[in-house]
């Protein structure tokens, strides 16, 4: 696998995992902060975890790319 592809995949996956864990922690401790007042809807939870993961993944990749400037 080329170095660039491995670099992108690694940073996107690690950022997604960090974002998904952050979303799960927020839901576990403060469910009302994300609109879950009467219980957690599975579809809403999945979409919120995806939203957290996607934004953290792009942030991780962008930070890694900026750190690679020599």
Image (tube, rainbow, N blue to C red):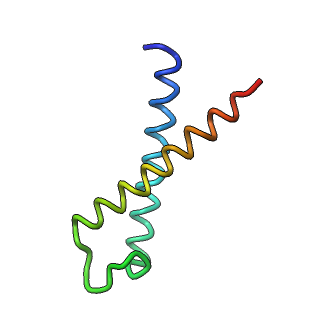
Image spot of residue 32 (x, y percent):
39, 82
Q: Is residue 62 above or below residue 69?
A: below
Picture quadrant where residue 9 is located: top left
Quarter of the image that includes the N terminus = top left
Image spot of residue 14 (x, y percent):
48, 41
* 1 sits left or right of 45 in the view: right
Image spot of residue 23 (x, y percent):
42, 62
Q: Is residue 22 above or below residue 62?
A: below
Check the image and name the residue furthest to the bottom.
Answer: 38
Check the image and name the residue furthest to the top.
Answer: 2
Which residue does the image show at 44% across and 46% down from the upper left? Answer: 16
Check the image and name the residue furthest to the right.
Answer: 70
Quarter of the image that includes the C terminus = top right
* 43 sits left or right of 4 in the view: left
Image spot of residue 38 (x, y percent):
26, 86
Check the image and name the residue furthest to the left.
Answer: 42
* 47 sits left or right of 62 in the view: left
* 31 sits left or right of 4 in the view: left
Return the residue nearer the eye: 55 or 11: 55
Which residue does the image show at 47% across and 60% down from the upper left? Answer: 22
Which residue does the image show at 44% across and 79% down from the upper left? Answer: 33
Picture quadrant where residue 66 is located: top right
């Amino acid at each position: 696998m080329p170095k660039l592809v491995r670099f992108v995949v690694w940073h996107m996956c690690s950022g997604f995992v960090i974002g998904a864990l952050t979303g799960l922690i927020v839901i576990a401790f403060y469910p009302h902060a994300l609109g879950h007042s009467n219980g957690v809807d599975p579809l809403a939870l999945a979409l919120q975890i995806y939203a957290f993961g996607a934004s953290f993944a792009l942030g991780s990749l962008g930070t890694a790319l900026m750190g690679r400037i020599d």
